[in-house]
Amino acid sequence: MSAPSASDAASSADALPVGALVCPEPDQRPDLWPWTATRDEDGALELGGCALPELADTYGTPLFVMDRADLRGRANVWATAMAEEFWDGYGMAGGDAFYAGKAFLCADVVRTVTECGMGVDTASLGELTLALRAGADPRMVGLHGNNKTEAELEVALRAENAAGERAGIARIFLDSPWEVGQVEAIAARLGVVVPVMVRVKTGIHAGGNDYIATSHEDQKFGVSVAGGEAIAVAEAVLASEHLELRGFHNHIGSQIIGTEAFEAAARIVMALRAELAERTGVCVPEIDLGGGVGIAYTGRDPEPTSPVVVARALASIVREESAAAGVPVPHVSVEPGRSVVGPTMVTLYRVGAIKDVTIDEDGRQRRYVSIDGGMSDNIRPALYGAHYTAPRANRRCDGPVMRCRVVGKHCESGDIVVHEVDLPADLRAGDLLVVPATGAYGRSMASNYNLLTRPGVLAVEGGRAQWALRPETLEDLYATDPALA
Ligand code: LLP
């Protein structure tokens, strides 16, 4: 089955009349913008009480600006929705939300989301070490990956709590039959018992793009439910002295709108849990239903589905399926990334060269607006055909507009940040453009292509600005070149 995605809606943008693709202002589409975004009396966009033109002058561009109050709000909504919908007072067995660190991770974000009660989901040595060093409680940290290294597993198993005792992280997600032996061997060597979950593929095909759909059969993640592999791996875990089977995990994909695909996957995972209970007498205490809740990137995208709506839909399925199978309800966790951090950040760029290009024999023109970043700070348009939008940040966008394409400064014609957007006809070099909804998979997927330095992330709150991540310098880049360092 396929689920609708937000980016489909924007794909036919080229055909629209000029004027239809003006970026909605914060008061028109609040879901597209961080919570505190507004225009000040001079017409400049403001975030966290800081005017974006002043931030650009002080801190330079390109610049990610993160609304920390907004991040706190979104983390609170997820943590509360899961705690409330799965509250044991409602006959449930508890619920948690783990922030998917791959969306964007730095110490500031770890602290902000964990203070709100979220755990942290990691997928590499870098993410895991960062989460632990930033102070995340190991009992609220998970480790994913389809090819985990010994080093990653050792850090996970040795992780210490605040008292300096070995605690180990909350759970390791086994992604293949091979990993049962791999994790068991390390656990045996360290003399510990490791809580694990088995990641399964449910056959649900969902997500904004094939590259971000993760639960259909023909892709690398998880073990198949349909082929009986999931049960076999679970039984192998149950037979192991050093592994403790906590439950099953499924992540169907990313950038999903609505609850239908999540519900279908939840039913399959619950049926699998009941099947294992029937075969072995062991009813695993937990399930994890992954991340994937979509956000809006442009004014043409549908409004995102609220975490509360998703949590409630999952809770009713979990309750129903448990009753139908006559098994106790499980503890339920989820792993949202994009919907926590995506809308909390914008990217601020300075406009440089502007060029009108004749694009067909009828003399139709397209205005190319070049900015000072590009595919190195936002690879999503090039990688997934993702759509973004951008208004002018330093002045209002009233008056006549022109259909424009916003392009980066890299040596690639596919270096496009915004495919189509209507921008003020009087846009000039030196103006500022701001792209909303760049918090997830923006800075985290940034590269040094063309030896550009990766931009910093400035956290703003209550009129104050502070680096969450400072910008890279040329010296950072050259430090790994022995002939230059
Ligand atoms: N859990 C697991 C196991 C995942 O693999 C992912 C994302 C998440 C949770 C979080 O999903 P989210 O809530 O952020 O959708 N780079 C792509 C997205 C790749 C997602 C990878 N896994 C993009 O920019 O759209």
Image (cartoon, rainbow, N blue to C red):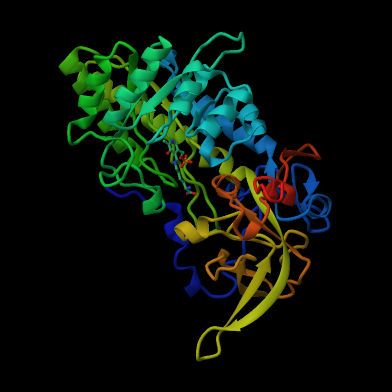
- Left or right placement of residue 240 versus residue 396 in this view: left
Q: Residue at x 57, y 67 (%)?
A: 21
Of all residues shown, which one is farthest toward the front?
A: 483
The percent coordinates of residue 331 (x first, y second) are 39, 19
The percent coordinates of residue 93 (x first, y second) are 39, 15
The percent coordinates of residue 446 (x first, y second) are 58, 50
Q: Is residue 330 visible?
A: no
Quarter residue 398 falls in: bottom right
Quarter residue 171 falls in: top left
Q: What is the tally of numbered marks visible in this picture?
A: 0
Q: Residue at x 54, y 25 (%)?
A: 118
- From the viewer's side, name the closer residue of 82 and 91: 82
- Left or right placement of residue 294 versus residue 164 in this view: left
Q: Is residue 466 visible?
A: yes
- From the viewer's side, name the closer residue of 125 and 320: 125
- From the viewer's side, name the closer residue of 241 and 36: 241
Vertical position of residue 320 compared to residue 222: above or below: above
Vertical position of residue 223 compared to residue 376: above or below: above
Image quarter where ligand 1 lies: top left
The percent coordinates of residue 275 (x first, y second) are 19, 23
